[in-house]
Amino acid sequence: MNTIKKTSWRSGLLGLVWLALCGSAVAQEQVLRLYSARHYQTDEALYSNFTKATGIRITRVDADDAGILARLKAEGAASPADVILLVDAARLGKGEADGLFRPIKSAVIEAAIPATLRAKAGPEGTAWFGLSTRARVVVYDKLKVKKDDVDTYEELAEPKNKGLLCTRSGSHPYNLSLFGSMMEHLGEARTESWLKGLVSNMARDPKGGDTDQIKAVASGECGIALSNTYYIARLMRSNSAEDKAVIERVGVVFPNQLSWGTHLNIAGAAVARHAKNVPAAVKFLEYLASPEAQNYFANGNNEWPAVPSVKVSNPALQAMSGGHFKAETVPVASVAAHQARVQQLLDRVGYK
């Protein structure tokens, strides 16, 4: 009888020890929760490498920029999000304006990311950081259009390009950011006149995405279009005969090389206002600014690194730009601040 009691007591004690060890392991496990508008398979390597290096497990909720901001608003203080990944300066600026981000101070990130590619710092720190860039360039039909007729953004609105222009919706963030940049360069009155010219030069109503615009130029439906560079690079790196034919037909111009330079937009990140794991969130953002992660942005998704010291080895980006191009130096935070006014101008000129 005593032996049975002693064995039972020992078993119970071992069970308690096991539970305690398990509880300790669970308590020690760190989880970082991302809300991400980056839907790129190549980013999976970024997440797994971060987990291997730090032991911090990542969970992710995917949506578009607008959906993520709406969700953060709806969840309020109950939001489980730690890090927000968005793919447009305008949306990052809106998230900051709506108080959805937690400003942070990081000497590592500030040393790596140029001031023009991040939010203006306040007393509490910086609300968001650009982590990769993409240029908004002109694609043209090499059989119908002269390169010299489309080598500035201003020329797209001139009568010589009447009936040639195709774009996606004017209200899409990629276009809103370009138009906000034009306000910085031209002022409001001249930007409104320029937008009127774009509407007048449309080959058809705005529709589709950037890849659709490129293919419309290649098919002859349009003569010129606007596109982010990574869409073009994807087609250049494709093994599809159809995609190769598209690239063969179109030319690419980095506009305004003799003036202020080509417009850059960003993909970036912020720490959520109600983040539960701020130290891990900051560590993740610092990792995304590292040379290793910056190379993934360039080679995996055909974006340019935000860190100037990181060299690009992506053959498509090199071929497209000739290895170098002049980019505008307007702070993306200033461009983002113009979005509401730009939308009013679009409504006024009838840009759909």
Image: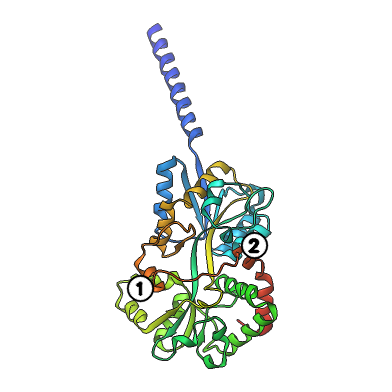
* Residue 120 falls left or right of residue 236: right
Label drawn at residue 236? 1
Disc 2: CA contacts within 10 A as few (<14), some (14-19) or many (>=20): some
Q: Which quadrant would the N terminus be assigned to in this image?
A: top left
Q: Residues within 10 Å of mark 1 (few under 14, many from 20)?
A: many
Identify the residue at image location x=50%, y=42%.
Answer: 31
Q: Picture coordinates of residue 9 (x, y %)?
A: 44, 14
Name of the residue lying farthest toward the front: 258
The quarter of the displayed image where residue 52 is located: top left
The residue that mark 2 highlights is 94
Q: Residue furthest top?
A: 2
CA distance for labels 2 and 1:
33 Å
Q: Nearer the viewer, residue 326 or 66?
A: 326
Work out whether 286 lies above or below 166.
Answer: above
Q: Which mark's residue is nearer the viewer, 2 or 1?
A: 1
- Write the residue at 40% across / 81% down: 251
Residue 43 at x, y = what percent?
Answer: 42, 56
Do we see residue 191 in this rendering? yes
Q: Is residue 158 above or below residue 276?
A: below
